Amino acid sequence: MVMHRLWSTYTAAQHRVMFLPGALLVVLAMLWWLFDLEIRRAGGVGLGELPGPALHGWWMVYGFFPFFVFGFLFTAAPSWSGGPAVPRPAYVASGVLMALGGFAILAGLVVPGLALHLLGWSVAVWALLRTVSGAPAGDRLHTGIATAAAALGGVGCALFLAWAAADWPDALALAEAIGLWGFLTPTFLVVCHRMIPWFTSRIVPNYVMVRPYGPLWALLAGCLLHATLEVMQRRELLWWVDLPMAIIVFWFSSRWGVARGARQVRLLAMLHLGFLWAGLAFTLYAIDSLARYAGLSWNAGQAPLHALGIGFFASMLIGMASRVSLGHSGRKLEADATTWGLFWLIQAAVLPRLLPDLVPGLPLWLATLAGVLWLLAFVVWAGKYAPMYWRPRADGKAG
């Protein structure tokens, strides 16, 4: 009886089914990575005889961020487009299959786990397509772009599975490029384009909402061009793409009122400040490319990638997932001191991960420190927010 009640509560809303395994896997995946990092320094390997760096890349792109992406989109997409809600069988099947896949991978069953994860992903994309196709004529653009990005991410998942199962060498580079530049970056950019000016307009007085679509299309095209150049191994040409993308992001940030928005409530400040990391990441990519173009011996290494992944994605995750969790559990949309501190802990984790790549000669243990700070932030975040997913709403309402 108790288990039935817990299951009914847990599956009562789309975000619950996705956010709970996402919160658990973000912690477990980083624990594995920190452990594997030390083993590989002594000559060890990753899970299931696959190399640790490739699996780390899978975890960061396909492993746990998608739980929060799908949990958010399952909740927001019907509201954005006016389409039908994602039905319970679809979001439960998607969440359970993806979660089983993630835990199987951590147990060393990498190929079966990847297959289960891909199956759950396919169900999620089908559910989003159903919402988009069932929406009336109107503003379906943001939902449609996010759904297309999720479908591209599914292609990347399949390519990673092909690499792991059949040792197809070209599939790994394609999977990594598609996952980062075809799925995650476009998804976060389109969510920011939709939500940051809208949230700001609800809080900042006399605010004029600016949300042009032309610059958004330019960013999305830039993502695909960046992926193409990465796969072609022409990083010395990336500055032609990434520098304009950085300018557009900073222009958006200025027009959306980052100076005013960041001084308002904490949940809004997180979104404005997190979005700045996208511009900084694109700037680092452009500087790295220009150094290669000029034939310099220095390059930025993995710093641009981690500015994007830790700075942009993780910051936005803390802001958006906290907001959804609070609002859909019947609590006030207010980030307390703990949540605000966790956001700044993520900011603190970015620097020690960037500096060893940007400044030659710095100790490598700084990268481990960044992982520890990331782990600490998400352990505390999971401890605070995960219980909301199996408990009834605080206001007594359904959902």
Image (cartoon, helix red, strand yellow):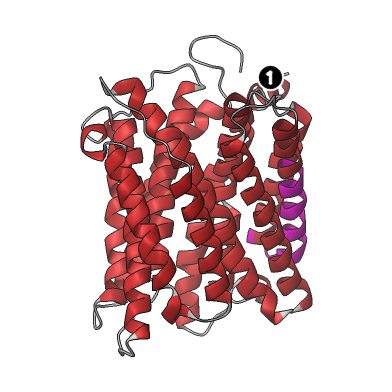
What residue sits 65% from the left and 43% below the top? 147
Residue 354 falls left or right of residue 39: left
The answer to whether 198 is drawn above or below residue 151 in the figure is: above
Q: Nearer the viewer, residue 355 or 297?
A: 297
Task: Give the secondary structure at mark 1.
Answer: helix
Q: In the rendered picture of this protein, how many numbered marks are placed on residues?
A: 1
Residue 351 falls left or right of residue 319: left
The stretch drawn in magenta includes residue 136 = no
Q: Nearer the viewer, residue 190 or 266?
A: 190
Q: Hey, which residue is sitting farthest front in the picture?
A: 214
Residue 120 falls left or right of residue 106: right
Label the magenta part by its dominant secondary structure.
helix
The crowd level at tag 1 (other Cα within 10 Å; few <14, some 14-19, many 20+) is few
Magenta segment range? Answer: 106-124
The answer to whether 389 is drawn above or below residue 35 in the figure is: above
Which image quadrant for residue 264?
A: top left
Callout 1, which amino acid? Answer: Arg
What residue sits 77% from the left and 61% below the top? 112
State the image coordinates of residue 17 (x, y, percent, origin top left): 64, 34
Which image quadrant for residue 311?
A: bottom left
Name the residue that disc number 1 marks. 5
The stretch drawn in magenta includes residue 110 = yes
Residue 346, visible in the rendered structure: no
State the image coordinates of residue 355 (x, y, percent, origin top left): 27, 70
The answer to whether 361 is drawn above or below residue 74 in the figure is: below
Instruction: Name the quarter where the N terminus is drawn.
Output: top right
